[in-house]
Image (cartoon, coloured by chain):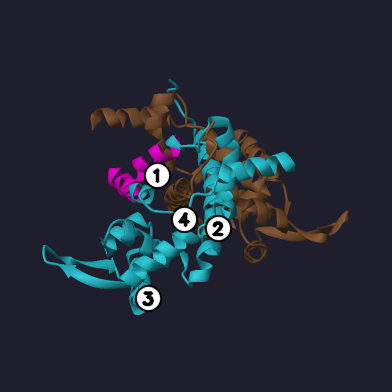
Chain colours: A brown, B cyan
Amino acid sequence: MKDNISKQEAIFYSHKMAQLSKALWKAIEKDWQEWIKPFKLNINEHHILWISYHLKGASISEVSKFGVMHVSTAFNFSKKLEERGLLVFSKRENDKRNTYIQLTEKGSDLLESTLNEYQPENNSVFKGSLPMTEMYGKLPEFLDLSALIKEIYGEEYMEILERSLDNIENLDMEQPAIIEDYKRQTKSS
Amino acid sequence: MKDNISKQEAIFYSHKMAQLSKALWKAIEKDWQEWIKPFKLNINEHHILWISYHLKGASISEVSKFGVMHVSTAFNFSKKLEERGLLVFSKRENDKRNTYIQLTEKGSDLLESTLNEYQPENNSVFKGSLPMTEMYGKLPEFLDLSALIKEIYGEEYMEILERSLDNIENLDMEQPAIIEDYKRQTKSS
């Protein structure tokens, strides 16, 4: 066990994390924008639909927390989605202070359409992970990254993430053999 | 070796990566803003100074690439830094097409002052990594994340990152025993 981390090492670490994290998020942001563009949604709007879909309704403060966006951002984009008839606002009997959002059938259908339109082969993070997948025999788990986010954002953030992930496993979808395609491509190139 | 990744698994993976990455980047962004606020710099401006400092001058296209920002963003914020006398623009004899920036002494001093003002104990990513550090005996390396970024952004991105990291190791700084402070805190709480 190393007892002492120098200021240099701390800056080194922070700088490395900043560069890696910015690069990763910008790649994800770009892919995400491309993916949902045909649905006339921006990332915040799609993220709100997604959170509300997976939590089967959510308060604005939950959307803000889990979506890592400002409360006013969560509220304003929810308003826009309400205007398009994709969700409704409500108060709950046992919690009058918070505003809740709930997807309408139209909102829920739209979110499912986006998921069906998702093309892994257009996703640079997914594609960039395939060589590691060859090595590990599965997609990388990023356990350190999960542990770090849990430290920063707390247990609840990870619980909501796991709930939303569980829901994805229960979705009904076509099943293309992506890895097979990848192998074919790398062989022929 | 798993031969087949279903569309579900791909969405599951992308969603998890999007949530973790957004959360990480937003935490880093917030810390970064707080850190450089006293110097009247925004993140883009500080990032440009940083890149130019470590590469000992850089072209706008290198700043854009390594800073993961649009060329026009790199150019416009460089202009603002030029107006403050923190850097100068130039062309190089052997490369007339690209515009280069070079820090002035004032720019270089300012960047060094920000590094000296960096307080690891105010950095949530650094603090969030300390429990893992206790476990591993060193700061986590995020090898999977590095491998992924290398796949997406290419060899050159990682080379520039390593060059800029090497320079940090050679900086002359005070050496507070951060881990010791952390241990004292966790013991007393």
Q: Are marks 1 and 4 in contact (CB under 8 Å)?
A: no
Which amino acid lies under the numbered mark 1 shown in the image of this protein? Ser
Q: What residue is shown with label 4? A: A33
Judged from this view, the residue extending furthest toward the bottom is B83
Cα gap from disc 1 to disc 3, whole angstroms? 33 Å
Q: CA distance from mark 4 to mark 3?
A: 29 Å
Question: In 3D space, how far apart are the residues under numbered discs 2 and 3 (Cα atoms)?
Answer: 23 Å
Question: Which mark identifies residue A60?
Answer: none
The Cα–Cα distance between marks 4 and 2, rounded to whole angstroms, is 26 Å
Nearer the observer: mark 1 or 2; the answer is: 2
Does the magenta segment cover residue A168? no
Toward the left, the furthest residue is: B94
Label 4 environment density (alpha carbons within 10 Å; few <14, some 14–19, many ≥20): some
Q: Are marks 1 and 3 on the same chain?
A: no
User: Which span of residues is magenta-colored?
Assistant: B144-164
The amino acid marked with disc number 3 is Lys
Chain hosting mark 4: A
Residue B31 is labelled as 2
Task: Tell whether B74 sits left or right of B173.
Answer: left
Residue drawn 71% across and 53% down?
Answer: A62
| Discs 1/4, front | 1
Horizontal and vertical percent position of residue A93: 88, 56
Q: Main secondary structure of the magenta part?
A: helix
The chain letter under disc 1 is A
